Amino acid sequence: MNLKNYLRIQPSQFRANYQEPDIAKTLSNQVFPWLPLKENNYIAVFIGTDRSTGDALGPLAGTYFEAMRPKNIHICGTVHNPVHAVNLQESLYTIYKSYDKPYLIAIDACLGKSSSVGSIIAENRPLKPGLALNKQLPQVGNINMTGVVNVSGFMEHTVLQNTRLSLVMDMAQEIANVLKQIDQQLSCSLQENITRKMI
Protein backbone atom coordinates (compact mmCIF):
# COMPACT_ATOMS: atom_id res chain seq x y z
CA MET A 1 0.00 0.00 0.00
CA ASN A 2 1.34 3.41 -0.93
CA LEU A 3 0.53 5.48 2.15
CA LYS A 4 1.34 8.73 0.34
CA ASN A 5 -1.80 8.20 -1.74
CA TYR A 6 -4.01 8.20 1.36
CA LEU A 7 -4.43 11.64 2.85
CA ARG A 8 -5.34 11.92 6.51
CA ILE A 9 -6.70 15.45 6.83
CA GLN A 10 -7.60 15.41 10.50
CA PRO A 11 -8.70 12.72 12.98
CA SER A 12 -12.34 13.15 11.96
CA GLN A 13 -11.83 13.24 8.19
CA PHE A 14 -10.20 10.90 5.68
CA ARG A 15 -10.07 10.77 1.90
CA ALA A 16 -8.71 8.51 -0.82
CA ASN A 17 -9.10 8.23 -4.56
CA TYR A 18 -11.60 5.56 -5.58
CA GLN A 19 -8.95 3.87 -7.77
CA GLU A 20 -6.47 3.32 -4.94
CA PRO A 21 -5.80 -0.34 -4.08
CA ASP A 22 -7.71 -1.61 -1.03
CA ILE A 23 -9.66 1.64 -0.67
CA ALA A 24 -12.65 -0.24 0.78
CA LYS A 25 -10.55 -1.81 3.51
CA THR A 26 -8.62 1.40 4.20
CA LEU A 27 -11.66 3.67 4.51
CA SER A 28 -13.73 1.13 6.44
CA ASN A 29 -10.92 0.75 8.99
CA GLN A 30 -10.91 4.53 9.47
CA VAL A 31 -14.70 4.87 9.70
CA PHE A 32 -15.55 1.82 11.81
CA PRO A 33 -14.15 3.20 15.12
CA TRP A 34 -16.60 6.13 14.81
CA LEU A 35 -19.60 3.80 15.09
CA PRO A 36 -21.14 2.98 18.48
CA LEU A 37 -21.63 -0.76 18.89
CA LYS A 38 -25.38 -1.32 19.18
CA GLU A 39 -27.73 -3.56 17.24
CA ASN A 40 -30.31 -2.75 14.58
CA ASN A 41 -29.92 1.03 14.58
CA TYR A 42 -27.55 1.65 11.68
CA ILE A 43 -29.13 3.35 8.67
CA ALA A 44 -27.27 4.29 5.47
CA VAL A 45 -29.06 7.22 3.82
CA PHE A 46 -28.12 7.50 0.15
CA ILE A 47 -29.00 10.99 -1.08
CA GLY A 48 -29.41 12.03 -4.71
CA THR A 49 -31.55 11.60 -7.79
CA ASP A 50 -31.44 9.38 -10.85
CA ARG A 51 -32.40 12.40 -12.98
CA SER A 52 -28.87 13.84 -12.84
CA THR A 53 -25.77 11.84 -13.72
CA GLY A 54 -23.53 13.36 -11.07
CA ASP A 55 -26.21 13.38 -8.40
CA ALA A 56 -26.97 9.69 -9.02
CA LEU A 57 -23.95 8.64 -6.95
CA GLY A 58 -26.01 8.15 -3.78
CA PRO A 59 -28.88 6.16 -5.31
CA LEU A 60 -26.46 3.98 -7.30
CA ALA A 61 -24.38 3.24 -4.19
CA GLY A 62 -27.59 2.38 -2.33
CA THR A 63 -28.65 0.00 -5.09
CA TYR A 64 -25.23 -1.69 -5.19
CA PHE A 65 -25.13 -1.98 -1.39
CA GLU A 66 -28.66 -3.38 -1.26
CA ALA A 67 -27.59 -6.17 -3.66
CA MET A 68 -24.86 -7.11 -1.14
CA ARG A 69 -27.58 -7.96 1.42
CA PRO A 70 -26.02 -6.28 4.47
CA LYS A 71 -26.92 -7.80 7.87
CA ASN A 72 -26.51 -4.80 10.17
CA ILE A 73 -27.05 -1.65 8.09
CA HIS A 74 -30.50 -0.70 6.85
CA ILE A 75 -30.77 1.10 3.50
CA CYS A 76 -32.68 4.26 2.67
CA GLY A 77 -32.29 5.55 -0.89
CA THR A 78 -31.84 3.56 -4.09
CA VAL A 79 -32.27 4.18 -7.82
CA HIS A 80 -35.85 2.90 -7.59
CA ASN A 81 -36.64 4.77 -4.36
CA PRO A 82 -34.31 7.79 -4.20
CA VAL A 83 -33.96 10.20 -1.28
CA HIS A 84 -33.59 13.71 -2.70
CA ALA A 85 -34.26 17.37 -1.93
CA VAL A 86 -38.03 17.04 -2.29
CA ASN A 87 -38.54 14.06 0.05
CA LEU A 88 -35.51 14.33 2.35
CA GLN A 89 -37.40 15.80 5.30
CA GLU A 90 -40.14 13.17 5.01
CA SER A 91 -37.56 10.37 4.70
CA LEU A 92 -35.77 11.49 7.86
CA TYR A 93 -39.09 11.72 9.72
CA THR A 94 -39.89 8.13 8.69
CA ILE A 95 -36.48 6.89 9.82
CA TYR A 96 -36.71 8.51 13.27
CA LYS A 97 -40.27 7.26 13.67
CA SER A 98 -39.37 3.68 12.67
CA TYR A 99 -36.09 3.19 14.55
CA ASP A 100 -35.13 3.85 18.16
CA LYS A 101 -32.16 6.25 18.26
CA PRO A 102 -30.90 5.44 14.73
CA TYR A 103 -27.28 6.02 13.82
CA LEU A 104 -27.22 7.52 10.32
CA ILE A 105 -24.48 7.24 7.71
CA ALA A 106 -25.19 9.82 4.98
CA ILE A 107 -23.87 9.27 1.45
CA ASP A 108 -23.98 11.93 -1.27
CA ALA A 109 -22.18 13.32 -4.30
CA CYS A 110 -20.27 16.59 -4.09
CA LEU A 111 -18.22 18.94 -6.27
CA GLY A 112 -14.66 20.06 -5.55
CA LYS A 113 -11.30 21.01 -7.02
CA SER A 114 -10.23 19.32 -10.24
CA SER A 115 -7.45 17.55 -8.31
CA SER A 116 -10.04 16.09 -5.93
CA VAL A 117 -12.34 14.56 -8.56
CA GLY A 118 -12.55 10.83 -7.85
CA SER A 119 -11.95 11.23 -4.12
CA ILE A 120 -14.16 9.53 -1.57
CA ILE A 121 -14.27 11.53 1.66
CA ALA A 122 -15.40 10.23 5.05
CA GLU A 123 -16.19 12.66 7.87
CA ASN A 124 -17.19 12.13 11.47
CA ARG A 125 -19.93 14.77 11.35
CA PRO A 126 -23.36 15.33 9.77
CA LEU A 127 -23.71 15.96 6.05
CA LYS A 128 -24.99 19.27 4.73
CA PRO A 129 -26.66 18.25 1.46
CA GLY A 130 -27.47 20.68 -1.35
CA LEU A 131 -24.60 23.10 -0.70
CA ALA A 132 -23.33 22.95 -4.28
CA LEU A 133 -26.75 24.05 -5.56
CA ASN A 134 -27.39 26.55 -2.73
CA LYS A 135 -30.32 24.53 -1.39
CA GLN A 136 -31.40 24.86 2.24
CA LEU A 137 -31.79 21.26 3.39
CA PRO A 138 -31.60 19.64 6.85
CA GLN A 139 -28.36 18.13 8.04
CA VAL A 140 -28.25 14.37 7.69
CA GLY A 141 -26.43 11.68 9.59
CA ASN A 142 -24.00 11.19 12.41
CA ILE A 143 -21.20 10.60 9.92
CA ASN A 144 -21.02 10.98 6.15
CA MET A 145 -19.28 9.79 3.02
CA THR A 146 -19.18 11.92 -0.11
CA GLY A 147 -17.76 11.34 -3.55
CA VAL A 148 -16.25 14.23 -5.54
CA VAL A 149 -17.77 13.62 -8.96
CA ASN A 150 -16.87 16.86 -10.76
CA VAL A 151 -15.45 20.38 -10.49
CA SER A 152 -17.18 23.15 -8.55
CA GLY A 153 -17.20 26.87 -9.15
CA PHE A 154 -19.44 27.56 -12.14
CA MET A 155 -22.93 26.42 -13.18
CA GLU A 156 -22.96 23.56 -10.69
CA HIS A 157 -26.33 22.23 -11.81
CA THR A 158 -25.09 21.88 -15.40
CA VAL A 159 -21.82 20.36 -14.20
CA LEU A 160 -23.72 17.65 -12.29
CA GLN A 161 -25.88 16.95 -15.33
CA ASN A 162 -22.78 16.49 -17.51
CA THR A 163 -20.74 14.28 -15.19
CA ARG A 164 -19.45 11.02 -16.68
CA LEU A 165 -21.67 8.10 -15.74
CA SER A 166 -18.74 5.67 -15.76
CA LEU A 167 -16.99 7.65 -13.02
CA VAL A 168 -20.15 7.87 -10.92
CA MET A 169 -20.86 4.14 -11.26
CA ASP A 170 -17.31 3.15 -10.32
CA MET A 171 -17.26 5.48 -7.31
CA ALA A 172 -20.69 4.26 -6.18
CA GLN A 173 -19.44 0.66 -6.33
CA GLU A 174 -16.45 1.51 -4.14
CA ILE A 175 -18.65 3.32 -1.60
CA ALA A 176 -20.86 0.21 -1.46
CA ASN A 177 -17.72 -1.88 -0.94
CA VAL A 178 -16.66 0.36 1.96
CA LEU A 179 -20.07 -0.08 3.59
CA LYS A 180 -19.93 -3.84 3.02
CA GLN A 181 -16.62 -3.96 4.91
CA ILE A 182 -18.13 -1.91 7.74
CA ASP A 183 -21.15 -4.23 7.84
CA GLN A 184 -18.86 -7.25 8.13
CA GLN A 185 -16.87 -5.57 10.90
CA LEU A 186 -20.13 -4.86 12.73
CA SER A 187 -21.09 -8.52 12.50
CA CYS A 188 -17.79 -9.57 14.07
CA SER A 189 -17.92 -6.94 16.84
CA LEU A 190 -21.55 -7.58 17.73
CA GLN A 191 -20.90 -11.33 17.89
CA GLU A 192 -17.93 -10.71 20.19
CA ASN A 193 -20.14 -8.62 22.47
CA ILE A 194 -22.74 -11.41 22.61
CA THR A 195 -20.03 -13.98 23.39
CA ARG A 196 -18.62 -11.82 26.22
CA LYS A 197 -22.07 -11.50 27.79
CA MET A 198 -22.49 -15.28 27.74
CA ILE A 199 -19.17 -15.90 29.48
Image (tube, rainbow, N blue to C red):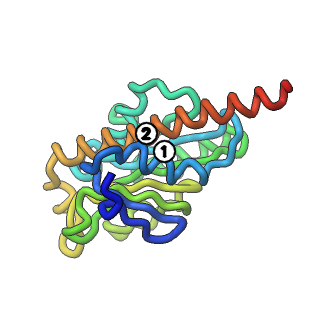
Give residue 180's quadrant in the image.
top left
Give residue 150's quadrant in the image.
bottom left
Question: Do the numbered discs 2 and 1 sit on residues whose CB atoms are within 8 Å?
Answer: yes
**Most foreground residue, 20 or 88:** 20
Label 1 sits on what residue type? Val
Residue 20, position as x, y percentages in the image:
28, 50
Asked which secondary structure carries label 1, the reply is strand
Instruction: Give the class, few, some or many, for how many residues have Cα within 10 Å of label 2's Cα (few <14, many ≥20).
Output: many
| Residue at the spot of label 1 | 45
**Most foreground residue, 35 or 138:** 35
Residue 186 visible in image: yes
The residue located at (77%, 26%) in the rendering is 195
Q: Quarter of the image containing the C terminus?
A: top right
CA separation, marks 2 and 1? 6 Å
Residue 114, position as x, y percentages in the image:
19, 69
Q: Residue 141 carries which label?
A: none
Residue 98 visible in image: no
Asked which secondary structure carries label 2, the reply is loop
148 up-or-down from 62: above or below? below
113 up-or-down from 39: above or below? below
Residue 153, position as x, y percentages in the image:
22, 75
**Most foreground residue, 7 or 78:** 7
| Residue at the spot of label 2 | 77
Give residue 126's quadrant in the image.
bottom right
